[in-house]
Image (cartoon, grey):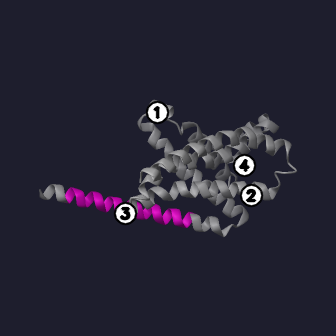
Amino acid sequence: MKAYFKFIKYFQEFLLIISVLGMLYLPLMLVFRTDIMTNDVVLKLYTISHLFLLFVMTIRPLADIFSGNKWIRPLVILRKGTGVFSAAIIVSFILAKLMIDPSLYFKGFGELKYWSMVDYAVLAHLADISAIILLVTSNSFSRRVLGDWWGIIQKLSYVYFYGSVLYVYLSYGDINLLLALILVTVLTIGAFIINKQRLANSQLIQNSI
């Protein structure tokens, strides 16, 4: 188990370093190397982002459901690194848009269609905003400063996940994303029910003592 925890620690650090480098390098590629950053490459980047986000959304409910499994619970630690890596890809696309025309990007915030379901725009933008907030607050400093609010803000991961997955599924019809959405929903509800039952049993035992 010691080696397992060490691997998790180093992998977490690796993901954080790659995320920072990615946000420095990827926007430049998206703007200046459109010959390389084709639509296929962009879609693959979105797929990678969604895969890491899927891990973030499933590992905690899995750890709660299989609470007796000593190998699953430590993986919850990786939610930070995988979440940052996923959000870093999305934020890189936003940075590329800002590099091209920042006034056009911010102008969209005041337009009605930006917040409408036309082309499912509101889903994409809610996911983008959530990704930015999660990325900025995924550090120890933010946790200390925000206190109890930090945990509440981290709930935006649900907005990020459902907004992003629904947008891509509805726009491109990727059935894998629909399956991912169903999986996360089932696991989240299942973990909630199991945790409530455990709490009720614990209170029952305390009351009987």
Q: Position of residue 65 (x, y in %)?
A: 39, 63
Q: Secondary structure at mark 2?
A: helix
The answer, for residue 111, to whether it is visible in the render is no
**Residue stretch rendered in magenta on the structure:** 181-204
Looking at the rendered structure, the kind of residue marked 4 is Lys
Q: CA distance from mark 2 to mark 3?
A: 36 Å
The residue beneath circle 4 is 113
Q: CA distance from mark 4 to mark 3?
A: 38 Å
Q: Residue at the spot x=72%, y=49% of the render?
A: 113
Q: Position of residue 189 (x, y in %)?
A: 43, 63
The residue beneath circle 3 is 193
Q: Secondary structure at mark 4?
A: helix
The residue beneath circle 2 is 43
User: Crowding near pointer 4: few (<14 within 10 Å), some, many (20+)?
Assistant: some
Q: Residue at the spot x=57%, y=58% of the render?
A: 54
Which labelled disc corresponds to residue 3? none
Which labelled disc corresponds to residue 146? 1
User: Crowding near pointer 3: few (<14 within 10 Å), some, many (20+)?
Assistant: few
Q: Position of residue 30 (x, y in %)?
A: 80, 45
Q: Secondary structure at mark 1?
A: helix
Q: Main secondary structure of the magenta part?
A: helix
Which of the two discs, 4 and 1, labels the residue nearer the N terminus? 4
- Image position of 56 with respect to 177: above or below: above
Nearer to us in this view, 88 or 190: 88
Which of the two discs, 3 and 1, labels the residue nearer the N terminus? 1
Which of the two discs, 2 and 3, labels the residue nearer the N terminus? 2
Q: Nearer the viewer, mark 2 or mark 3?
A: 2
